[in-house]
Image (spheres, grey):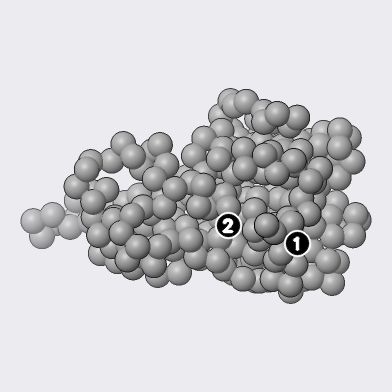
Amino acid sequence: MIETGLQDKVVIVTGAAGGIGLVTARRFAREGCRVASWDIQAGEPEPGGLFQQVDVTNAAAVEAAVQEIIGRWGGIHVLINNAGILRDAQLVRIKEGAIAGTMTDEQFDGVLGVNLRGVFVVTRAVAAHMISAGGGVILNASSVVGLYGNFGQTNYVASKAGIIGMTRVWARELGKFHIRVNAVAPGFIATEMVNTMPAKILQTMRDHTPLGRMGQPEDVANAYLWLASDAASFITGAVLSVDGGVVTGT
């Protein structure tokens, strides 16, 4: 059994009201961590933890939440930037030879705001405290589509590719302060939202995955846990694919 070294560590998980974020918060809580669960939606704290309703795009709200955690537990050891949204559309959609629609400014800006700027805002606030404390771990949610692209997801792909870029920059900038920064790139994961899709779409996802199944939120949570643990103490600037070998495309 691998010792994670995470007992009593303070962990922030954004987007923790449901899906991968909720499962991740529960996984770290089972490891003995004090978990601060963040989401713009209402939610429940993990045992011994804290739930904070936070808009990750609001710098003042983020700083206030960080200060509450510092005041309660004295520091932050792990940040998991998991929050994200989808607003899918083709750049330009053609039907019967005519333009039938485009991706709107609102769709593009909304996704980049949460998925990319939100990660920047939260990490900026937390990293300052980690530097003062002498170290920490920052984990960012990218996606397999950030590596390979995907039809109809200009905004989402741009945000997840940007996450990879920021992860590598921060690994370089923060390493001297003993802060490790890595990204996780999930493939098709069977969250509550995904499971409501038509059976045909779900089967297509499985067919594109060499391991023959969709991932479970626990698969991603376990990847976060390992990257946060002492077992990954010499890993930084990496992108860990949790995708069953999936190949995305049109």
Residue extending farthest left: 96
Image-quadrant location for residue 138: bottom right
Q: How crowded is mark 1: few (under 14 residues within 10 Å), some or many (20 or more)?
A: some
Residue drawn at x 45%, y 69% is 147
Image-quadrant location for residue 127: bottom right
- The disc at residue 223 is 2
Residue drawn at x 57%, y 49% is 221
Q: Mark 1 points at which residue?
A: 230
Residue 79 visible in the displayed image: yes
Residue drawn at x 86%, y 33% is 72
Above or below: residue 223 compared with residue 45: below
Q: Which amino acid does label 1 sit on?
A: Asp
**Near-viewer residue (236 or 147):** 236
Residue 62 visible in the displayed image: no
In which quadrant of the rendered image does the N terminus lie?
A: bottom right
| Residue 143 x %, y % | 47, 59
| Residue 192 x %, y % | 40, 37
| Residue 206 x %, y % | 29, 56
For the residues labelled 1 and 2, the Cα–Cα distance comes to 13 Å
In which quadrant of the rendered image does the C terminus lie?
A: bottom left
Image-quadrant location for residue 150: bottom left
Q: Is mark 2 on a helix, strand or loop?
A: helix
Q: What element carries label 1?
A: helix
**Among the two numbered marks 1 and 2 on one chain, the one whose residue lies closer to the N terminus:** 2
Tell whether 223 sits left or right of 47. Answer: left
Q: Residues within 10 Å of mark 2 (few under 14, many from 20)?
A: some
Tell whether 192 sits left or right of 229. Answer: left
